[in-house]
Amino acid sequence: MRRIAVCPGSFDPVTLGHLDIITRASTLFDKVIVLISTNAAKNQASFSTTERMMMIAAATAHLDNVVIDILDGLLVDYVRRVQAVAIVKGLRAVSDFEYEFQMALTNKVLYAGAETVFLTTSQENMYLSSSVVKQIAYFGGDISPFVPACIQESIQKRLSKQGEGNS
Ligand code: PNS
């Protein structure tokens, strides 16, 4: 039996922290589906789902057992449909815990057929988030320590304040 894991997130945009979790999950499971999802609690995304998908595709091109999909609906419905055995999430500093714990328990009530598996973030990504990357890019700062090199330029161009008003 092939063991499938789903790795859901907003990925707006994908960071080295996400890539680290996806890479480690790809060594633990036969197939990993990176699932671009909408977080209803967050504001409008900066990148469209297609843009996010293309960025993740570029960043994970070297990982043979990783595919990308877009979620339209409840995570657990998708997990059940593809018969995934796990939902993989990265866990950063303490601040993530309560929210992630709530989601894991809720998802378990909605669908008991998959486990939420938390991978602790690597130390260097402890405080990294997509929002921090967006803020740095907006003010023209160097985002190279935080995002995969192959998508750095497109993120920078798209979010830079200097680019405002340009077509
Ligand atoms: O990267 P994020 O924003 O922390 O990811 C949160 C996400 C998208 C995984 C979560 O909001 C989610 O699972 N959304 C899909 C809708 C859903 O199933 N909601 C119920 C979760 S308890």
Image (cartoon, rainbow, N blue to C red):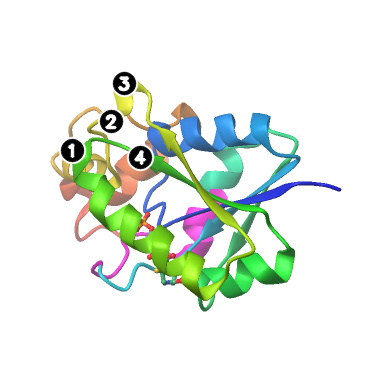
- Residue 151 visible in the snapshot: no
Q: Position of residue 65 (x, y in %)?
A: 74, 39
Q: Tags 3 and 1 in contact by the CB under 8 Å rule?
A: no
Taking the image in four quarters, ligand 1 sits in the one at: bottom left
Question: Element at badge 1?
Answer: helix
Q: First in sequence: mark 3 or mark 2?
A: 3
Q: Tags 2 and 1 in contact by the CB under 8 Å rule?
A: yes
Type of the residue with mark 3:
Gln
Q: Which residues are magenta?
A: 42-54
Mark pair 1, 4: CA separation: 22 Å
Query: According to the image, label 1 marks what residue?
Result: 136
Question: Which image quarter: residue 112?
Answer: bottom right
Q: Residue at x 36, y 44 (%)?
A: 155
Q: Residue at x 29, y 46 (%)?
A: 130
Q: Residue at x 86, y 48 (%)?
A: 1
Mark pair 4, 2: CA separation: 22 Å
Query: According to the image, label 3 marks what residue?
Result: 123
